[in-house]
Image (cartoon, helix red, strand yellow):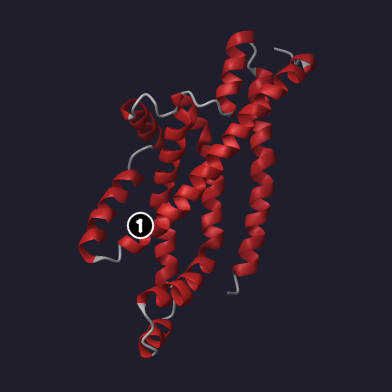
Amino acid sequence: MTWDWEFTGKIVPDLLDGLVVTVQATLLGYVLALVLGLAVALARRVPVLGTAVFAVMEFIRCTPLLVQLVFVFYLAPSYVSAFTVGVAVLGVHYAAYTAEVYRSGIEGVPPGQWEACRALSLPAHRTWGAVVLPQAVRKVIPALGNYLIAMFKDTPLLFAITVGELMYQASRIGGVHFRYLEAMTLVGLFFLLVSVPSAIIIRQLERRYAAV
């Protein structure tokens, strides 16, 4: 099969539409993963609740993301869009990992900081909000950034539940025109164009916070 530049030019707009959906799903899912992951990390410090939350997160980490997407998609009410399901499952799945990152950051706070808070009789919300979390989150920013790229590369799985992301558009174009070479090549190129700059930014963050 030879490369057709005219056909390539015609399919670029549709693929760019798919790229927009891909980026939207990634960013929304990532925000959900950051917020829910922090909540899970804090919940795990509560004796009984922490055990239950740990069991749920282990279940999520030990089952494939694709299975979770398909299961929730067919279980969700019909008025819930495939995009919403995709974002929710991506966010919950990666929250299981970001929670561990947050936990390592919290445990990395020096014991002297906790003792100083107790010595000053700081209330819990001041201890966490002004002392512990600012230090913990700053240390794990690079690790959290890596999960953003990982989530972006997992978005083609949303194709399985008919979300109109990049892979879905490429497959649709290939099915209509019986040409997959140009569409699939552009999909790989678009992923590179987004992933490489993101990786460079994360490396800069790692260097910046390495000495913290």
Residue 170 in the image: state x and y as whole percent: 61, 21
29 versus 68 height, above or below: below
Q: List the single residue furthest toward the right.
A: 6
88 relative to 197 in the view: left or right? left
Instruction: Name the residue: 46% across, 70% down.
Output: 133
Amino acid identity at mark 1: Val
Instruction: Name the residue: 58% across, 74% down.
Output: 212
183 relative to 43 in the view: left or right? right
Residue 91 in the image: state x and y as whole percent: 44, 44
Q: Nearer the viewer, residue 209 or 27?
A: 27
Q: Quadrant of the N terminus?
A: top right
Q: Residues within 10 Å of mark 1 (few under 14, many from 20)?
A: many
48 relative to 78 in the view: left or right? left
Q: Quadrant of residue 70?
A: top left
Callout 1 secondary element? helix
Residue position for label 1: 40
